Image (cartoon, grey):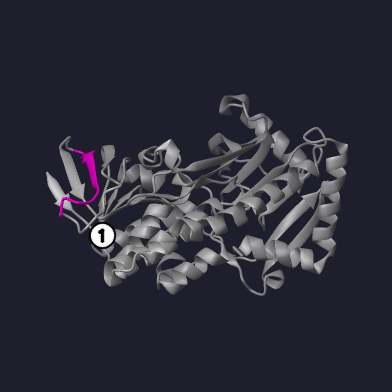
Amino acid sequence: MRESSRVVVIGAGPAGLTLANLLRLAGVGCVVLERQSRSYVEQRQRAGVLDYASRRIFEEWGLAETLLAGAPEDHAIEIRVDGDPHVLDLRALSGGRTGRAIPQQMLITRLMTAFLENGGDLRFDAGDVALHDIDAPGLGPGSGSGPRVTYRDAEGAVREIACDYVAGCDGHHGVTRTAVPPRAATTYTYDHGIGWFTVLADAPPPRLPLFAISSHGFAAQFQRGPAACRLYLECAPDDAPDDWNDERIWKQARLRLGDETLPAGPIVDKGVVEMRSFVIDPMRYGRLFLVGDAAHIITPMGGKGMNLAIGDADVLARALRAAVRDGDEEPLAAYSATCLRRVWNQQEFSRWLTELVHESGDASLAGTFRRQLARARLDRLFASAPAGHAFADLLAGG
């Protein structure tokens, strides 16, 4: 069963669904293949907050009203040091360049609905996806001179799509990243040597996004709805979810957040996040373009993973529009370099913030000297207007 499409998008996460919607608006035909079921994609819980740069992307493409309705501004953050609260007014520090507090799962659902309701071709339960001839010249879908993508549909039939371009939006463990030969790219990795124990709970959320720093270990708490919150607790990288029962979770949360009256609630989900980073350069091989987590992994600190994926999708959609509509492939040639400038900027910010909040609390991580240096950086962040402006600018996506 052979078909053709200008672009095949592999993966229906933030990168793939953003790209699919932007391509639809750009008049570039695409098919989206997702290996999971629709119910899985809709129900899977994900972290993430939309920064100002991503908000502007959706505004520029005319999608903000549909996607961000009802999402409040992410206008301030509390950093609690040994129980002492410090509130940073991000709206004032950034000159009004604020993001939106919309959970990634809600954004995913809205992106999916927008694409499907406007005639988008999104195929769930696509198994055994394989890429062929991705280094072919690509002279028009169906010409026989471009890439091909094969997969097994929900009924078990093998299908083939001929295309000009493939967008790899299927994450770090997907098939598209591994389709790039090792000789064709350089891989950069970094491991902070710590983990984050994550908890989704039906418990009252904090008034503001909260970071807590103390000798007991780092903690954070964020809103995930009017009556739900997500907790992050620093842990050993080899911890397992079963190592943390409910009693331990709430005891450590109260201790680290400095709040003995913190209300508990049912634990909906828990897991361990590795605090590691990964970047592949270039983000292109032939007619394959890697987008989001397929090209780079960033620590959760700073909330940049989803936003980098949206930024990649914006750059690629504009480049594909130029190639398809105007026959100009120069923006595609610049795709990787354009994206990687932003990726490395946010990698550096995430590393800086990760070390700041962990080392300023727990001297066992890097020693007492580094702890004092981190405390000095914290003091500067609270006392220096230029330091606060720089922090807010980077949170905004600058």
Q: Is residue 146 magenta?
A: yes
Q: Which residue is mark 1?
A: 120
Closer to us: 332 or 55: 332
* Relative to 69, residue 375 above or below: above
- The answer to whether residue 315 is left or right of residue 360 is left
Instruction: Give the residues drawn in magenta, as a range.
Output: 143-154
- Per the image, is 207 magenta? no
Q: Can residue 27 be seen?
A: no
Residue 34: image quadrant is: top left
Q: Residue at x 76, y 61 (%)?
A: 87
Q: Is residue 106 above or below residue 296?
A: below
Q: Reply above or below: 94 against 229.
A: below
Q: Position of residue 173 (x, y in %)?
A: 43, 37
The picture quadrant where one finds residue 251 is top right
Identify residue type, mark 1: Gly
Residue nearer the viewer, 209 or 287: 287
Residue at horizontal 39 percent and vertical 44 percent from the top:
170
Q: Residue furthest left?
A: 1
Q: Horizontal placement of 252 versus 288: left or right?
A: right
In the figure, is residue 215 to the left or right of 52? right
On the image, the x and y values in percent for residue 393 come to 66, 65
The residue under the point 65% across, 48% down is 221
**Residue closest to the eye, 129 or 90:** 129
